[in-house]
Image (tube, rainbow, N blue to C red):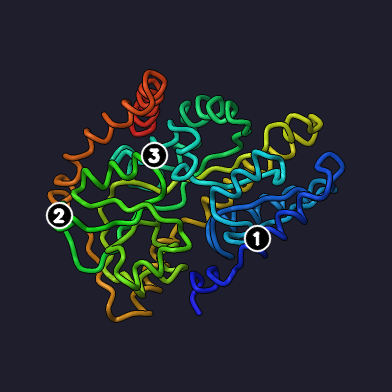
Amino acid sequence: MNKSTMLRKITGATTLTLAAAIGATSVANAATWRYAHEEYDGDVQDVYAEFFKEYVEENSDHQIQIFEFGQLGESDDIMEQTQNGILQFVNQSPGFTGALIPEAQIFFIPYLMPTDMDTVVEFFRESDAINEMFPELYAEKGLELLKMYPEGEMVITLDEKASSPEDLQNKKIRVMTNPLLSATYEAFGATPTPLPWGEVYGALQTNMIDGQENPIFWIESGGLYEVSPNLLFTGHGWFTTAIMANQDFYNGLSEEDQKLVQEAADYAFDKIIGHIDGLAEESLEKITEASDEVTVTKLNEEQIQAFRERAPQVEERFIEMTGERGEELLNQFKEDLKEVQSN
């Protein structure tokens, strides 16, 4: 049974029972902090959570209780639970947070981010946009942004091989509920189709949609290649995610515990960077070994340029959505990238 099938067996009653149970304990008196993320056991967000847990529990008397994807609902559910104080920590990608914080959609402007891992990692470490501007935006929504980190290059899977925007014409591509991501696939010629993650495998299997995008480890972990076997590497972006705390909870911590939480987030960042190094290659190898039907298309520079030429219209759409503040963030983003790349 694949993981998507397992997820579909989780009932609404179970989710409600879990949420009610964890909400019954007073946060102020709890020695156990609750942390939910969007991925499965052993996936990148889960590994990050385990490193975070390791640091907290080895350096304090506190404990971390981790909830994997589906145990407390979908991404929107765990964000709501965090804002309401039921959860103390949440790991959620800007793909979903973008509905709450429009500026977070910046990560879906195609070809804005570099493609080599060393530059990407250095950008996340040094960027003023990431480390100074984004925390202020998250704080406005009652969230303490602890760390943003990359998970891997985005890869498109399709029902048939493709190598150009023309090949994507009218293809129904599943996207997260994110207006700018939809604008990206419209620019690429496809028909963006928002769907909750729990419905993606079945929708691919029944041809309700023609494709989707995710990091390659997620494509392997979720078994998506089984029902969407044609992999397309366009180099258009990296999947980014973020760990946040409920701000009232965080502000109520002692100075010592705030320092502990920040150090745990930094420790987990350093560890996860080592974890994802080589993960994409390993996951792709597993996929090609598991299925003879899989095809892998890696575009050359000329082919990539056909997609890259469509990126400016997405950038314009981002500024339309976010106004002067978004434009300021985008300019800082570009300055930070330029500085990292020049080094």
Q: Looking at the picture, tell me which residue is in the foreground, 89 or 50.
A: 89
Do callouts 1 and 3 mark residues in contact (Cβ within 8 Å)? Answer: no
Which residue bears the numbered disc 3? 107
Distance CA(mark 1)–CA(mark 3)? 30 Å
Residue 15's disc is: 1
Task: Tell me the kind of residue under disc 2.
Answer: Ser
**Disc 3/disc 2 C-alpha distance (Å):** 22 Å
Query: Looking at the picture, which amino acid does disc 3 mark?
Result: Phe
Quarter of the image for residue 109 reads top left
Q: Which residue is mark 2?
A: 164
Q: Is residue 146 above or below residue 193?
A: above
200 displayed left or right of 64: left
Q: Nearer the viewer, mark 1 or mark 2?
A: 1
In terms of image quadrants, where is residue 95?
A: top left
Marks 1/2: CA distance?
Answer: 42 Å
> Looking at the image, is mark 3 or mark 2 earlier in the sequence?
3
**Nearer the N terminus, badge 1 or badge 2?**
1
Indicate the amino acid at tag 1: Thr
